[in-house]
Image (cartoon, grey):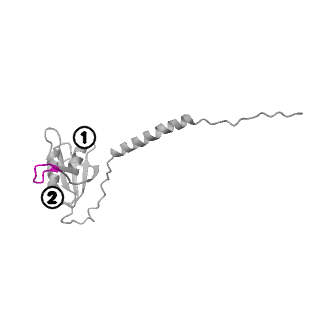
Amino acid sequence: MRVRRLRKEVAALEVTAFINLIVVLVPFLLSTAVFTRLAVMDMTLPAQSNHKLEQLKGNDLKLEIVIRPEALEVGDRIGGLIERIEKKDGHHDVKALNTLMQAVKQKFPDTKTATVLSEPDTPYEALVQVMDAVRSGRTNNGGPKLVRVELFPDVSVGDAPVRTKGAS
C-alpha cells in the first residue's frame, strides 16, 4: 500500500505590522520619558535627630520653616524661633520670608540645607511658594539689575510638629 504524505509548507511569519508599531512606539516612549524627568525635583526627608547627642555649634544652623494656617514660623532646630511671619491679605507673605532667608544666608553663607514642615491641610500652592522662597531669591547686589541668588537649595519636606492646645 502506498502511503500518502501531505506536503506541509513552512508557514511564513508576517511581522511587518509589528515592526511598524515598534518604529512608531519607541521614539514616542523615549520622548515622553525625557519630558517627565524634567518635571521631577529630587528631595529628601529630614533626618531624625537625637537632641541629647546633638552638639550646639556657634555657626551650625538647622533651618526650619513651619507652615501654619495663620503664619510662617522660621526657626533653628537648636536655637528656637527666629521670626514669625504673619499672613498678609489672606496669603502667606513669601516676600518677607525671602527677605529673611537672604539675611539668614548672609549670616550663615556655608549652610545649604533647610527643612520645610507643613501641616496636613496646607495647600499645595503655599508649600511650593515657600519652597521657592527658601531655595532662591533675587537681589540687586548694589547694582541696577536684579540677579538670582542661591539661598538654601537642599530643601527637605516633612510634617509640622503638632501644637499643644495652649499654644496659638
Residue range corresponding to the magenta coloring: 138-147
- Secondary structure under tag 2 reads helix
Taking 56 as reference, is 24 above or below it? above
Query: Which of the 4 quarters of the picture holds residue 55?
Result: bottom left
Say what amino acid the circle numbered 2 marks: Gln
| Spot occupied by residue 37 in the image (x, y as percentages of width and height) | 36, 46
| Spot occupied by residue 28 in the image (x, y as percentages of width and height) | 43, 39
| Spot occupied by residue 117 in the image (x, y as percentages of width and height) | 25, 49
Q: Magenta stretch mostly in which secondary structure?
A: loop
- Looking at the image, the residue that sits furthest to the right is 1
- Label for residue 143? none
Say what amino acid the circle numbered 1 marks: Glu
Q: Which residue is mark 1?
A: 125
Q: Can see residue 103?
A: yes
Q: Can see residue 164?
A: no
Q: Nearer the viewer, residue 69 or 153?
A: 153
Q: Which residue is mark 2?
A: 106
